[in-house]
Amino acid sequence: METRRLGTTDLHVSVIAGGCWPMGGDYWGRTDDEESIRTIHCALDLGVNFFDTAPGYGAGHSEEVVGRALVGRRQDAIISTKVPAAANMIRKSLEASLKRLQTDYVEVCFVHWPRRDEPIKATLETLEELRSEGLIRAIGVSNFTVDMLEMGRRYATIDAVQPPYNLLWRFCEDDILPYCRKHNIAVTTYSSLAQGMLTGTLRLTTNFAGDDQRLRSVLWQSENYGKCLYTVERLRPIAKDLGVSLAQLALRWVIDQAGVTTALVGARTPAETEENAGAVGWDMPDDVRAEIQDISDDLYLSMPYYFDMWGNWSTWNRRGPQREL
Ligand SMILES: NC(=O)c1ccc[n+]([C@@H]2O[C@H](COP(=O)([O-])OP(=O)(O)OC[C@H]3O[C@@H](n4cnc5c(N)ncnc54)[C@H](OP(=O)(O)O)[C@@H]3O)[C@@H](O)[C@H]2O)c1
């Protein structure tokens, strides 16, 4: 498995990473802990070394599962977890995460979501403190805008960002990707398969069971679902001609984008993990990339403002100035 350097740190992460949100047991419907553990072991065997989790995924359950899976294999893994943006909650949150993960430190700690009412200085300085104590090795921010990144970098070395990015949600191309390329900040993309939409396994008739949060996601709303599935159907013959699956095509596209370090993918089973790891080890010809880009552009141009996760993410996130001090 190909690895890439995480920003300017000495960490080298696999280009396909394990996204462990679906292992939390909420928001994604059914989950089976033993299957999740087999999935992580399969990923490790394939050379996937980067696993992303958060205390918010199943109220800590995802972290517990990752911790159990890595018993005896901790040295093979680079773990990222997340903390809230409130400085006075960060240490307590991280300590609880470390306990669930059965580890003394995590390699990467992301601020999960920015909060405009929280002083960014205190948040980032607290993370630098945790780094100096050896509890974390690298600092990341997730869902931050460029103005927040710019501000945050005054108080800490930000090593990585985590924005949503895939063929259907491309708004980070406008500013986040160029900014990170310029400042050598790693980009770890989330929802790299558009929450499964880009795997081509979903139909207009697909019903998500139980509390599967995808029902609420903007992609599954009636005005968008058909358009997205049509886009996926246009990609299908391209994947077929290349002899790869749609998931492999979509992931290859993400990891080939300039500035992207690794694609987080929420595989649930060893079979999905194996398929996703197959995004590596082949090259996408330039003319094919251009064709895919055109298909993606058609959708992007038809409803640009929908290219955020919940339909209002970018408007919410751009509202008002960040409280600086
Ligand atoms: N920082 C943040 O705010 C944030 C937000 C979202 C996600 N994340 C991180 O990013 C990770 C990845 O994003 P995500 O989980 O939202 O979305 P994703 O990776 O785009 O999609 C995950 C879903 O895709 C399906 N899938 C994966 N591989 C497949 C394959 N080969 N064939 C068929 N289906 C496949 C699975 O669904 P089914 O099998 O159920 O169909 C899985 O639940 C998360 O796990 C989390 O670590 C971070």
Image (cartoon, helix red, strand yellow):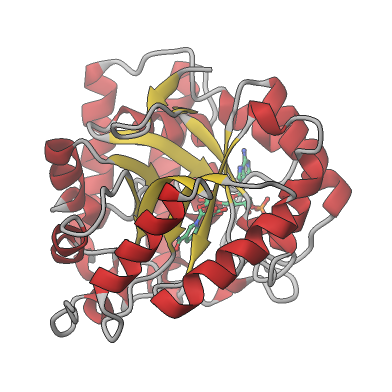
Evaluate whether residue 116 shows in this view: yes
Residue for point 44% across, 65% down: 112
151 vs 262, left or right, is left
| In this view, 322 is above or below 11 | below
Image coords of residue 298 (percent x, y)? 22, 50
Please state which of residues 125 and 33 is positioned toward the viewer in this rendering: 125
123 vs 35, left or right, is left
Q: Quadrant of the C terminus?
A: bottom left
Count how many numbered circles sit on residues in the image.
0
Please state which of residues 62 and 105 is positioned toward the viewer in this rendering: 105
Q: Quadrant of the N terminus?
A: top right
Residue for point 79% across, 63% down: 30
Image coords of residue 163 (percent x, y)? 34, 55
Residue for point 50% across, 30% down: 248
Image coords of residue 274 (percent x, y)? 67, 27
| In this view, 253 is above or below 217 | above
Image coords of residue 203 (percent x, y)? 59, 57
Evaluate whether residue 231 shows in this view: no
Residue reaching furthest to the right: 34
